[in-house]
Amino acid sequence: MNIPYTFSILTAWLILNMAACGSSQQAGYAEDETFSTENVPVFNADSAYHYVKSQVDFGPRVPNTEAHQACGDYLIQQLEKFGAKLYVQQASVSSYDGKLLNARNIIGAFNPESKKRVALFSHWDSRPWADNDPDPQKHFTPILGANDGASGVGILMEVARQLQQQAPSIGVDIIFFDAEDYGTHRDYNGEHKEEHWCLGSQYWARNPHIQGYSARYGILLDMVGGKDATFKYEYYSEMYAKDVNRKVWRTADKLGFGRYFKKQDGGGATDDHLFVNKLAHIPTIDIIATSDQYSFFEHWHTVRDDMDAIDRQTLQAVGQTLLQVIYSEK
């Protein structure tokens, strides 16, 4: 997540006052389409909360640290436990200030033989600096990243557990990107570029884990566990994958989660989905929390992004919506 008014994973620059683009009647999910929750698993928010906490318990997951290495190993072990076909991308990527980061993109493929696939993304690293903290003395303190990072991974871990217990009719790839949040420090005097963020997703988009990899669409989760979170139509999601946005938001509304998923224009976020769209050409949306008072959520890029920032009801709303979308695919 990025600078003031970006989302958790990259330098999200919130673009205000974007006009709505076109009608909400999009292909793939007509308003009069029969909606059924039959055969859709029930998302377990307590389980997702456990997976969030398990990551936070390692401490800040900053590349090139022991906590980062240990948490990555844990994520790999869990995906293997859930029966996924594992792919681990080792990459040496360069940060905005020239530091080499030992990064790992972690991919778990479910029903890998299927040609019909959906990709689910989140970043698993955490911000090296609390450079949005109200206390300037903490601007170089690593953050725990409970919401900004761990919440999306926690939800996808619970999704993976459900995929093992009840296989959907399509293939699903769960992809954890690394080095998303090692973007430019807000006090950096040099040039600020969007390419300074989302280093793991840029690498994957240019070097997919399977040659010629493709998916019907992708859904990125970022900062999806905060109290009273609201998710609006993110600008680049509207640009590249408007029909997917409409599908997900209508699904959430039908499930009774309309107070979380607002059918309103949000802003733009320099996040992993931007590079998946631009480089891998997979239409991908970003479910990311924004608010009127704060750029993203209240404790974004501060030392208070800890487990106190996580709400099980928000995890439930996002997780159940995601399961409904996945299990409705044919």
Image (cartoon, helix red, strand yellow):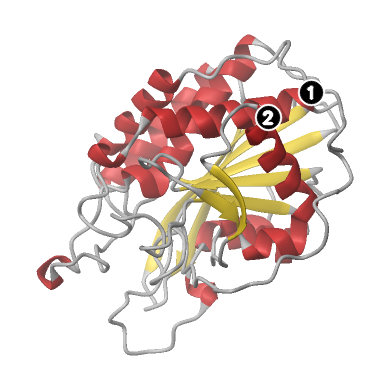
C-beta proximity under 8 Å, tags 2 and 1: yes
Q: Position of residue 140 (x, y in %)?
A: 19, 67
User: What whole-number distance in Å separates the C-alpha atoms at marks 2 and 1?
Assistant: 8 Å
Residue ID for mark 1: 35
Residue ID for mark 2: 254
The answer to whether 120 appears left or right of 138 in the picture is right
Q: Nearer the viewer, residue 210 or 161?
A: 161
Amino acid at the residue labelled 2:
Lys
Q: Position of residue 248 (x, y in %)?
A: 69, 40
Q: In terms of secondary structure, where does tag 1 sit?
A: loop
Q: Position of residue 278 (x, y in %)?
A: 72, 66
User: Upstream in the sequence, badge 2 or badge 1?
Assistant: 1
Q: Nearer the viewer, residue 311 or 105?
A: 311
Residue 166 in which image quadrant? top right
The answer to whether 245 appears left or right of 108 in the picture is right
Q: In terms of secondary structure, where does tag 2 sit?
A: helix
Q: In this picture, is 141 found above or below 14?
A: above
